[in-house]
Image (tube, grey):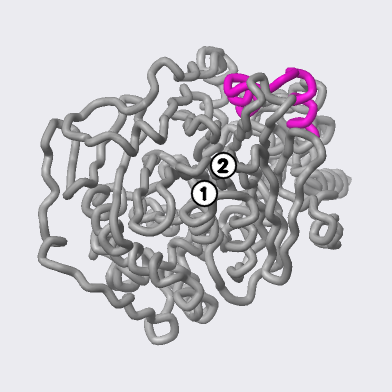
Amino acid sequence: MLKKFLKVLAWIFGILVLLIAGLLIYVRAVAVTSPPMITPTEAFDEAVTQPDSGLYKWRNDWFRKSESGLYELYVEGAPYERGVANGKLTHDLVQYQEQVFTDQIHRLVPSDFYLGMLKYFVGWFNRDLADNISTEYKQEIYGVSQAASHDFDDIADPYQRILNYHAAHDIGHALQNMSLVGCTSFATWGDQSEDSTLIIGRNFDFYVGDEFARDKIIAFYNPTKGHKFMMVTFGGMTGVLSGMNDQGLTVTINAAKSEIPSASATPVSLVAREMLQYATNIKEAQAIAAKRKMFVAESFLIGSARDGKAAIIEKTPDGMDFFETNENYIVSTNHFQGKTLGETQLNKDHMATSASPYRFKRVKELLAQQGKNSVQKTAVILRNQQGLGGEDIGMGNEKAINQLVAHHGIIFQPEKGLVWISTAPWQLGKFVCYDLKKVFAKNMMANEEIIEQDLTIPADSFLLTNAYRQYIKFHPYRFPFNPRTDLMPDSLVKWNPQSYHAYMLAGDFYVDHKEWEKAMPFYEEGLKKEVATQQEREHMQKNLEHCKASIK
């Protein structure tokens, strides 16, 4: 029934937002964190200038919005200086992103009482967060926080809020173990690539609502220490989700099954950031991962131009593993593959009940079918919506590589210093290409495009189909962030006829209204489809039996 279904999704998605809410309202007395020591100068009071319409500068740092819809940011210098530059230039996006978080929280959890109860737990949970973040990154985050809104100062001061947001990704992954957060990444090189170069593709399927993913920033960092690098981010975020440095090292992260953590440690995105800024090869990335304590399980797919291949670093709060293949390709979804972590009971149980192994097999199937890989073929795989054998498994199925929820899709060609990033919607819009050497060599004085126009990958033709138009109607009902009261069961299955999810939603609607006979055929049909997770299959089976018993 609808209420039970929403309970399931609330545990999958809602707990993420609940704990982000907790991050917002922790008790000052328990989780108070002093700002890091910095030496600001009067120069930091300099105003942002606009040398050309649409181009904003602060010192040598600059910010603009591309014709693609992506924002582009360049910052340089010492940690606090970078943070100040970031905050000054992306001021509106920093404040927008925080507003999105708080609005989503209050839509899902309107009760001040329940939000209030969380503050004691999260205050205790994050009590040691700052101790596990390097001084460099605390200084940078403090710089960014100068741009945060004071509308939320009753929650905490800007620095504490922005610092804690960096742990929200980890808490979300830890408590979304029943999935629907299903990132996919893969790499080919040698005889598996058309030109023998290393090619990496990934979908970052972390969904917290469409508004959350609206304003993506392609950030180019030129720090005083470490390597220059680029990353895909959003307002207020200094950690790395996907990125590449000027040494040809790439980092992407894939969540794995975690126990519920008891306390925070170093956020995953900041471990990935350290790798990108300070590693030149896979071995150096391993050394960085080894010295950082994390509080969730994560796979880091590391691509390396110097090594001419990719490998996976697997890490949990208690252990670490390393996985590489004898083949000239590697695939990562949301389970471990190493000899140690891959054999844990937690990982085995996750593989038995989640969509991760299915997506893993589908990537391997497509790589085998298409022959030698290329950047264009990588985009085709990232956009693929079919199941094994090309089966129609419904739009938005978590077993598909393209689940129509991606925050971004990204493709790297490290040996050439090239990166392609998807534009809206999801990974269906065109992929635009940046040449890192050209971007870092550019002195921006005019508002001009910096992408490699002739290397653009066109938008997916799926956008022109009736199926896409139908999915857009179905999409708002998929998640519990914005509960809809106008749900029409027949329309759901009409819009997405091969989706088990559509039939499950329809059945839940009728059960919620105690219309048992109407619910039964929807569950029966839904169970014939390709169901993403064992939990959802059991949910439909249980409700179907309840309907049968209620009719007698």
For the stretch drawn in magenta, the main secondary structure is helix
Q: Residue at x 11, y 44 (%)?
A: 49
> Badge 1, how many Cα within 10 Å: few under 14, some, many 20+?
many
Mark toward the start of the polypeptide (1 vs 2):
2
Kindly identify the amino acid type of the residue bearing the numbered disc 1.
Leu
Say which of 428 and 306 sits in front: 306
Q: How far from the left and from the top, in percent, is residue 290? A: 64, 66
User: At 18% from the left edge and 44% from the top edge, which residue is drawn?
Assistant: 57
Q: Which residues are magenta?
A: 361-382
Write down the residue under mark 1: 241
Q: Amino acid at mark 2?
A: Phe
**Does residue 414 appear left or right of residue 325 in this picture?**
left
Is residue 376 one of those drawn in magenta? yes
Residue highlighted by disc 2: 204
Q: Secondary structure at mark 2?
A: strand
Q: State whether residue 51 is above or below residue 166.
A: above
